[in-house]
Image: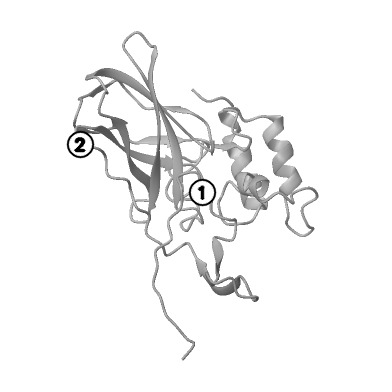
Amino acid sequence: GNTRSASFVVTFNPSFTAPTNNTLSGFVRNSGGLADDWKPFSEFSLSGFTTLTPTPAPNSTTINLNLLLHGLGKGGDSSNPGSGGNANPKRVQRTVKVELFNSQNQLALTKEGNVSFDSATGSFKGTVDLGSSFSTGVYTTKIKSDQFLKKLIPGIQSLTQGQTNTLPQATLTSGDVNNDNRIDILDYNIFIDCYSDITPAKNCSDPVKKQNADITDDSEVNQFDYNLFLRELNNIRGE
């Protein structure tokens, strides 16, 4: 007959950002250029997909991260560090930027990697590849992720070239909506533009803007985000 079946794997580049509803639509096209061209074949959720972690190159130095993110999982917040947050965040993978400073407090290396939500611990965990040319030494480490202030990992870490180095757990403060490493009136204005409880948001047609304002990561910008934002005002600048 005219029906054919096929299996395939979909991969995304590192800069891919999931849509706010965490859902994608798939389309297929016949290579023969038929008149009906592109046809929808499926709509699927990203929430059940497995995140693939790139395999470090031989002799690479890696660091293991374990991050508590305010408002998510068991991350707590500035006013209530031991409290819980959204136990089912929509974006289960986050990109982090790692900065390493040497013993002279000079920036020695900047790398990006991914951390993924661990529902059992309520934290985000991941491994960042520092490369094969990394030098053994003592470093201080800072971590930054979108919506969160930059955080200095506690203590001084002794990192060994060619090995996996586990860093102490760190907690990141939420509310940096515009990602300038500050929590101020600029973040508040974006948040208010996207706030929608009883009435629609007044100025939030950009899905990226809404995603950034949704600091509780539940696809809504409402009183829960507002309350978290207010509780984070004890810390207004990243480290």
Tag 2: Cα neighbours inside 10 Å, few (<14), some, or many (≥20)? few
Tag 1: Cα neighbours inside 10 Å, few (<14), some, or many (≥20)? few
Identity of the amino acid at label 2? Pro
Element type at marker 2? loop
Residue that protrudes farthest toward the bottom in the picture: 1
Position in image of residue 201 (x %, y %): 77, 53
Left or right of 79 in this view: 203:
right
Position in image of residue 17 (x %, y %): 53, 49
Left or right of 124 in this view: 38:
right
Residue at mark 2 to residue at mark 1: CA–CA distance = 26 Å
Element type at marker 1? loop
Q: Which residue is mark 2?
A: 58
Residue that protrudes farthest toward the top in the picture: 104
Position in image of residue 145 (x %, y %): 49, 36
Give 222 or 210, whichever is nearer the viewer: 210
Left or right of 4 in this view: 32:
right
Residue 227's disc number: none
Position in image of residue 31 (x %, y %): 52, 69
Q: How is the image coloured?
A: one colour
Identity of the amino acid at label 1? Phe
Tell me the quarter of the picture where residue 114 sits: top left
Q: Is residue 35 above or below residue 85?
A: below
Give 158 or 77, whichever is nearer the viewer: 158
> How many marks are shown on the rendered structure?
2
Residue under the image location 65 percent in, 75 percent down: 35
Q: Earlier in the sequence, mark 2 or mark 1?
A: 1
Residue under the image location 49 percent in, 28 percent down: 150
Q: Which residue is mark 1?
A: 16
